[in-house]
Image (tube, grey):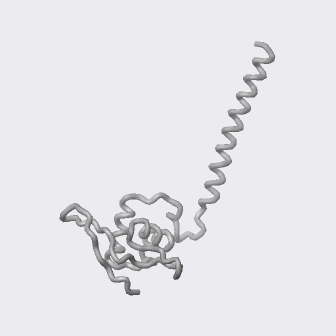
Amino acid sequence: MSIEKTLESMRKDIADIKLILSSIKFKERRNRERKVVNPEHKRSCKKWEVEEVDQLVKLYEKGKSLDDIAKLHERTVGAISARLAQMGYLFYDKQKQEYRKQTEYLSYDESTKEYRKVKTSNDE
């Protein structure tokens, strides 16, 4: 094998190694950023499971407080509020800088297997 081919092969190997190291560093940095600060919030930064979302909605519709739901799900109140807002149960009031109840939202009706609009009071 000629020296040029050997050098070219080594350059490719070095490029591959740099790519692998870059990927490892990225994953390590991402994992450091995802460390749970509060041990009560073990599920923070974790993906929401379908069953967890179903339970969240049922608890919210039964009138459980956001604090109780957050403790049960091992997430922050902010995460619970944001998920409920994403699903249309709450909205973020920019003037008051807080989440507030929607006046109506979609609720799944088990008997008819359909979503229906539900009106709620916006009294705080």
Quarter of the picture holding the C terminus = bottom left
Instruction: Residue 96: give x, y in percent of width and height.
Output: 52, 82
Q: Residue furthest right?
A: 3
Please tell me which residue is depicted at 63% across the width and 59% down the height of the picture. Answer: 33
Instruction: Residue 35: give x, y in percent of width and height.
Output: 60, 61
Instruction: Residue 62: give x, y in percent of width and height.
Output: 31, 77
Classify residue 116 by image quadrant: bottom left
Classify residue 85 by image quadrant: bottom left
Quarter of the picture holding the N terminus = top right
Q: Is residue 92 above or below residue 28?
A: below
Q: Is residue 37 left or right of residue 52?
A: right
Q: Is residue 40 left or right of residue 16?
A: left
Q: Residue furthest top?
A: 1
Q: Is residue 13 above or below residue 112?
A: above
Q: Is residue 112 left or right of residue 93?
A: left
Q: Residue furthest front?
A: 95
Q: Residue furthest bottom?
A: 124
Please tell me which residue is depicted at 26% across the width and 64% down the height of the picture. Answer: 115
The residue nearer to you, when weighing 3 against 97, is 97
The residue nearer to you, when weighing 105 against 73, is 105
The residue nearer to you, when weighing 29 against 74, is 29
Please tell me which residue is depicted at 73% across the width and 23% down the height of the picture. Answer: 9
Classify residue 80 by image quadrant: bottom left
Q: Is residue 44 above or below residue 12?
A: below
Instruction: Residue 28: give x, y in percent of width and height.
Output: 65, 51
Please tell me which residue is depicted at 52% across the width and 69% down the height of the picture. Answer: 41
